[in-house]
Every structure is written in structure tokens, then in C-alpha cells.
Image (tube, rainbow, N blue to C red):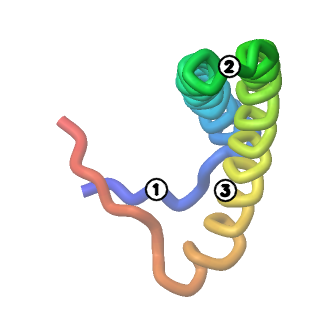
């Protein structure tokens, strides 16, 4: 068994940020799809253009939140969790 006793903050933040960008892209496309369908059913032609903005802003905001949560999460893990409870045990082959 090996124990993870330190996580690089920038590395984890980059991975979380990348996951956030992809999650935001999927969420933005789903919102665009649902707003376009709802707008056409209700006769609101501008609903699709509002949904198009979410395809742009969702990946940015999700990526930013993912990056910050990864950076802060790694810091909390390194400074508080590891000294008090020990690291994460993994088995490597």
C-alpha cells in the first residue's frame, strides 16, 4: 500500500477546471436545446438566442468554479486532512 500525503494544487486545479469546462459545455448545449424547443412551442423566437449564450458562458463559469474548487480542495487536503487523518491509501502494481 502506498499513501498519498500531498496533492499538487495546480495539477488538481487544472484537472478539475478541465472537467468543469466539459461539464459546462454539455450543460450549455442541453439548456440551448431545451430553451429552443420551449421557445418554439411557446412562440418566443428569442429564447434560442438566450440559450446560445449559455453555450459560451457555461463552460467558462463551470471551468472557473472547477479550477477554484480543485485548488482550494487540494490546499485543504494538504493542510488539514493529511496531518489529522493521514493520506489516501492506494495499491499500486
Q: Nearer the viewer, mark 1 or mark 3?
A: 3
Instruction: Give the residue drawn at x 69%, y 42%.
Output: 66
Per the image, the residue denoted by label 3 is: 74
Residue 74 vs residue 34, the one in the foreground:
34
Q: Is residue 59 above or below residue 6?
A: above
- Residue shown at the point (74%, 21%) measured from the top left: 44
Q: Looking at the image, do the residues carrying marks 1 and 3 touch, with CB atoms under 8 Å apart? A: no
Can you name the residue that lies furthest to the left here?
A: 93
For the point 63% across and 33% down, the residue is: 20
**Mark 1 and mark 3: Cα distance apart in space:** 12 Å
Kindly identify the residue that appears in the image at 32 percent across and 54 percent down: 2
Q: Which residue is mark 1?
A: 4
**Alpha carbons under labels 2 and 3: distance apart:** 48 Å
State the mark number for residue 43: 2
Q: Secondary structure at mark 2?
A: loop
Disc nearer the start of the sequence (2/3): 2
Q: Residues within 10 Å of mark 2 (few under 14, many from 20)?
A: few
Q: Residues within 10 Å of mark 3 (few under 14, many from 20)?
A: many
User: Is the residue marked by circle 1 packed among few (<14), some (14-19), or many (20+) residues within 10 Å?
Assistant: few
Of 24 and 10, the residue lying toward us: 24
x and y, in percent, of residue 45 in the image: 76, 13
Q: Depth-wise, is mark 2 or mark 1 nearer the camera?
A: 2
**Structural distance between the alpha carbons of marks 2 and 1:** 56 Å
Counting from the top left corner in percent of width and height, residue 33 is at 55, 18
Vertical placement of 93 versus 8: above or below? Answer: above
Query: Earlier along the polypeptide chain: callout 1 or callout 3?
Result: 1
Task: Find numbered disc 1 in the image and state the secondary structure of the residue it sits on.
Answer: strand
Q: Between disc 2 and disc 1, whose residue precedes? A: 1
> Tag 3, which secondary structure?
helix
- Residue 87 placed where, x, y %? 46, 67
- Left or right: where 71 falls relative to 80: right
Q: Which mark is residue 75?
A: none
Amino acid at each position: 500500500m502506498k499513501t498519498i500525503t500531498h496533492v499538487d494544487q495546480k495539477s488538481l486545479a487544472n484537472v478539475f477546471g478541465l472537467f468543469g469546462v466539459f461539464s459546462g459545455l454539455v450543460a450549455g448545449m442541453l439548456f440551448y436545446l431545451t430553451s429552443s424547443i420551449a421557445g418554439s412551442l411557446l412562440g418566443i423566437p428569442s429564447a434560442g438566442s438566450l440559450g446560445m449564450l449559455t453555450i459560451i458562458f457555461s463552460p467558462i463559469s463551470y471551468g472557473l468554479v472547477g479550477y477554484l474548487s480543485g485548488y482550494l480542495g487540494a490546499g485543504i487536503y494538504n493542510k488539514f486532512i493529511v496531518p489529522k487523518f493521514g493520506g489516501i491509501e492506494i495499491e499500486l502494481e
